[in-house]
Amino acid sequence: MTTAIVNIFLKEGVLDPQGKATHHALDSLGFKGVKDVRIGKQIILQLETDDKSEAKAKVKEMCEMLLANTVIEDYTIEMK
């Protein structure tokens, strides 16, 4: 069993309205000193293999085809 953790974030320069709203809300609540907030998502996959390199290649393919919108999003893959 292999676990893949995929973190997906909007690329730099892409407007992040959820991050901006959260930043504004934190500031309104008195949490000063937060320079910027970027909101992303994390996807955790349990894969039925012990071959981490094969699993990572499959997860990369999943990201490119479905999990991430590579036009506006970047992603990282961590294998455990």
Image: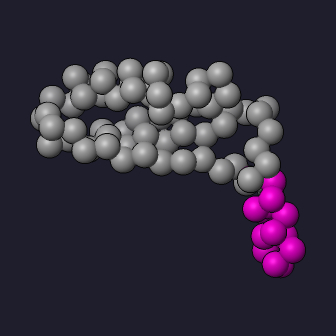
Color encoding of the figure: one colour
Q: Looking at the image, is 71 positioned above or below residue 79?
A: above
| Residues shaded magenta | 19-34
Query: Which residue corresponds to the image point at 59% horizontal and 24% vertical from the top-left?
Result: 70
Residue found at the far bottom of this picture: 30
Residue 6 in the image: above or below residue 32: above
Q: Quadrant of residue 56?
A: top left
> In what quadrant of the picture does the C terminus appear?
top left
Left or right: 63 with respect to 13? left
Identify the residue at image location x=49%, y=42%. Answer: 7
Report if residue 33 is visible in the image.
no
Q: In this view of the protein, can residue 41 be seen by the observer?
A: yes
State the image coordinates of residue 79 (x, y, percent, origin top left): 30, 39
- Tell me, yes or no, whether the highlighted magenta stretch contains residue 33: yes
Image coords of residue 54 (percent x, y): 22, 23
Give the camera-side residue of 67 and 80.
67
Is residue 48 shown left or right of residue 63?
A: left
Q: Give residue 16's position: percent from left, percent from top.
A: 76, 44
The quadrant the N terminus occupies is: top left
Label the magenta part by its dominant secondary structure: helix
Marker count (numbered) = 0
Indicate yes or no whether the magenta region holds residue 74: no
Q: Looking at this view, is 27 or 40 the one in front?
A: 40
Residue 20 locus on image (x, y percent): 81, 54
Q: Residue at x 81, y 78 (%)?
A: 29
Q: Is residue 21 above or below residue 65?
A: below
Q: Residue furthest front?
A: 66
